Amino acid sequence: MTEPRASHVERATAETAFIVDLILDGRGSADVATGVGFLDHLLTALARHARLDLAIAGRGDLEIDDHHTVEDCALALGAALDRALGDRTGIRRFGSAYAPLDEALARAVIDLSGRPFAAVELGLRRERLGELSTENIPHFLQSLATAARMTLHVDLLRGDNDHHRAEAAFKALALALGQAISRTGFEDVPSTKETLGEAEA
């Protein structure tokens, strides 16, 4: 029987504390409490559409602002993803998807390469969505890519409503991630170098 791909990560600093439990081959259940409501909404969509089972419990110095909370949540989730993938044997590695939400359309492309890089263009115009600063949405994605050791491109192709634009981006990310982490049935590392290490592939 195939070993479950799961991880548990605890990240604590003087500014924040997060606990993340992740199952890659899940059903899309989410129990997310970051202290930032709209971030919880985006992460719930990510789990549902990538079919991850995800639990995140955290607190941050929201009396200052939401930056540290958003960043450290992303780093903890990225570390959990990296840990659950292990040596990345037998994964599809690449994923790409479009996701619409009404008038908004987003595209996400992923390579679980072991090399962290992110290019994110969302064009958000509002200062905040709920208690989440919109400048921290691309920062979340960049931090996630760093800790997960993946290459990530996310682009908003069109849209007027920033709630729709941000949610479409996370749904596209979810669909692409679901593809990239899926098992191929082959017991090898999908790289000509036969490794997806820190600076390989």
Image (cartoon, rainbow, N blue to C red):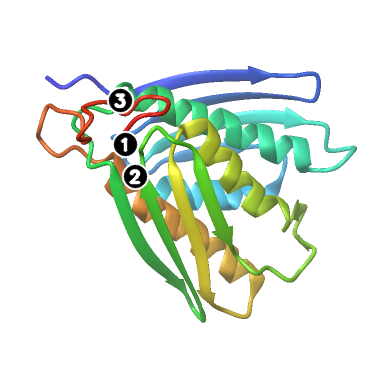
Q: Secondary structure at mark 1?
A: loop
Q: Secondary structure at mark 2?
A: loop
Q: State the residue lying farthest toward the right.
A: 64
Return the residue at label 3. 5
Q: Nearer the viewer, residue 91 or 193?
A: 193
For the N terminus, the image quarter is top left
Tell which circle, 1 or 3, labels the residue nearer the N-terminal end: 3
Return the residue at label 2. 51
Tell which circle, 2 or 1, labels the residue nearer the N-terminal end: 1
Quadrant position of residue 56: top right
Residue 38 visible somewhere in the drawing: no
Return the residue at label 1. 26
- Residue pictured at 57% horizontal, 28% vertical: 76
Tell which circle, 3 or 2, labels the residue nearer the N-terminal end: 3
Could you tell me residue 37's position as x and y percent? 69, 49
Bin the neighbour count of mark 1 within 10 Å (Cα to Cα): few under 14, some 14-19, many 20 and up. some
Q: Is residue 153 left or right of residue 75?
A: left
For the C terminus, the image quarter is top left
- Residue pictured at 31% horizontal, 52% vertical: 95
Q: Look at label 1 and name its amino acid.
A: Gly
Q: Is residue 197 left or right of residue 38?
A: left
Q: Look at label 2 and name its amino acid.
A: Arg
Relative height, residue 146 to residue 172 (above, below): above
Q: Is residue 104 left or right of residue 26?
A: right
Quadrant position of residue 51: top left
Q: Are marks 2 and 1 in contact (CB under 8 Å)?
A: yes
Could you tell me residue 116's position as x and y percent? 49, 37
Q: Look at label 3 and name its amino acid.
A: Arg
